[in-house]
Image (spheres, rainbow, N blue to C red):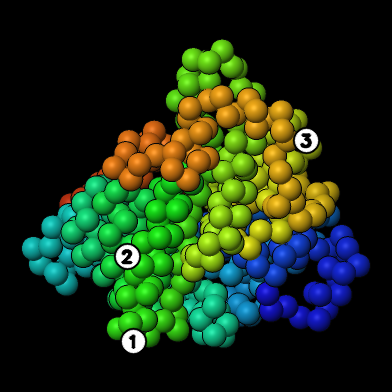
Amino acid sequence: MTVTEQDETQRAVGSPAVSVLERFAAVSPGTEIWWDSSPLVFESWRTQMLDAAPVGERARLGEQLRRLWDPAKPEATLFRGVTTNPPLSLAVLRDDPSRWHNWAYSYQAAHPGASVESTFWAMYKEIVRLGAAAVLPLHEQSGFRYGHLSGQVDPRSVFDTEAMLVQASELAALAPNVMVKVPGTREGLPVLRELTRRGISTNCTLAYTLPQFVAVAEEVQAGLLEARRADIDLTRWKSVVTDMSARWEAAPEFVSDAAEVGLELSVEDRRWAGIAVFKRAQRLFRYRAYPSKMLICSVRMGPGPEKTGRCWHLEQTAGADAVFTLPPAFLTDFVLRGQDLRFTPRIWEDVPDDVMARLRRVRYFRQGYEPDGIPVEDFDQIPALKSTAREFSQATNAMVAFVAECMQSGPLEGNGPALGLPDGEEQK
């Protein structure tokens, strides 16, 4: 990570001015922290953070937040990339509804006869394009190593290979640093391979289990070999495989499968389960030298009393050669409550034997933890995948409804129409 010598000195002496995120990133040069939302909402989030902070803490916190992301000095700030999805794009509309209402109205005026769906898709691509432009300087200054922005195919198409290929091609054409998010469904695997064959960066989303991670890595590896044989330019190419950890841990099926063998798993047991899967993925990817990099999202605070500010998802995986993508809702808690945390490289430490003994009794855990625990033809039935696809589709439908209402009225001066998801749905 490129930083100033002064920042390096501060880290070395453990200055209290250094944020908890900087301490975490300093454990390993392979650790990347990404902003898990559109860059278009960062300034609003930063302002809200500072307004809510005690007056005496605002100067210190303001400096820390500036070092997270400074558009004027992208190469010297902590965020190395960006992930977005439909719920996070819905947050962009919430942040400035009148702007996007007027955008939809202007688009329709310039494209007479455009349908609601085509206008929605154009708006979504515009959000992706603007976000990619915000981090393009980092992409260029880092020699294309960093500064990718993930734009996701329509979650209503996660079981339609052909539709995803069309959408992915359109997203990739928006900017040279767009990384296309494709689901870890059975139908998504050939899309990931084909995009890789074309030299297009990808982020596999809706993935929760080691069988998915391995299947995706194998497809990407095969596509990369095909690209090299065809002499495709790969200078901007990057691949990450996302582990939506907390969503897998929280599935009701985990509890019911444990109950079938007479176990009542604690919150700590279930958190260890997600950590165990990620740790094993890290080891397997390293051993097999896959070209993809693991990414963990859906991280949560805890477990433990709220006042402790603990975050096992980060504490137990510190030192990983991986991407950690963190949404605003999580960062609000972590930056404020985790200030006293210190990190050591625990990624290669084993999960406690007694915990693993309990977890291995549960079918749900074995399916997620063993490389061959779920056959590819059953990926679409993974409970967390199905529930996340429904949630993301709901957010997409809310964006479509917003567009429909915009198209029924003229330009606005004030707020645009209400958006149809409760607050907080944009957290991964």
Please give left or right for residue 18 compared with residue 286 in the image: right
Report whether residue 398 is seen: no
Q: Eyeballing the image, is 53 above or below 16?
A: above
Q: Position of residue 418 (x, y in %)?
A: 35, 44
Foreground disc of the pair 3, 2: 2
The answer to which of marks 3 and 2 sits earlier in the sequence is: 2
Q: Position of residue 301 (x, y in %)?
A: 66, 40
Residue at 29%, 48% in the rendered image: 186
Residues packed near mark 2 inside 10 Å, few (<14), some (14 to 19) or many (20 plus): many
Q: Would you identify the image quadrant in which residue 262 lies?
A: top right
User: Disc 1 marks which residue?
Assistant: 231
Q: CA distance from mark 3 to mark 2?
A: 45 Å
User: Disc 2 marks which residue?
Assistant: 193
Q: Would you identify the image quadrant in which residue 20 lies?
A: bottom right
Foreground disc of the pair 3, 1: 1
Q: Eyeballing the image, is 247 above or below 53?
A: above
Residue at 46%, 72% in the rendered image: 238
The answer to which of marks 3 and 1 sits earlier in the sequence is: 1
Q: Would you identify the image quadrant in which residue 2 lies?
A: bottom right
Name the residue nearer the viewer: 134 or 56: 134
Residue at 68%, 74% in the rendered image: 1
Query: Which residue is farthest top?
Result: 262
Q: Position of residue 143 (x, y in %)?
A: 54, 85
Please give left or right for residue 68 compared with residue 210 in the image: right
Residue at 63%, 25% in the rendered image: 358
Query: Which residue is farthest left?
Result: 113
Q: Are marks 3 and 2 in contact (CB under 8 Å)?
A: no
Question: Callout 3, which amino acid?
Answer: Lys
Question: Callout 1, which amino acid?
Answer: Asp
User: Disc 3 marks which residue?
Assistant: 307
Q: CA distance from mark 3 to mark 1?
A: 55 Å
Q: Element type at marker 1?
A: loop
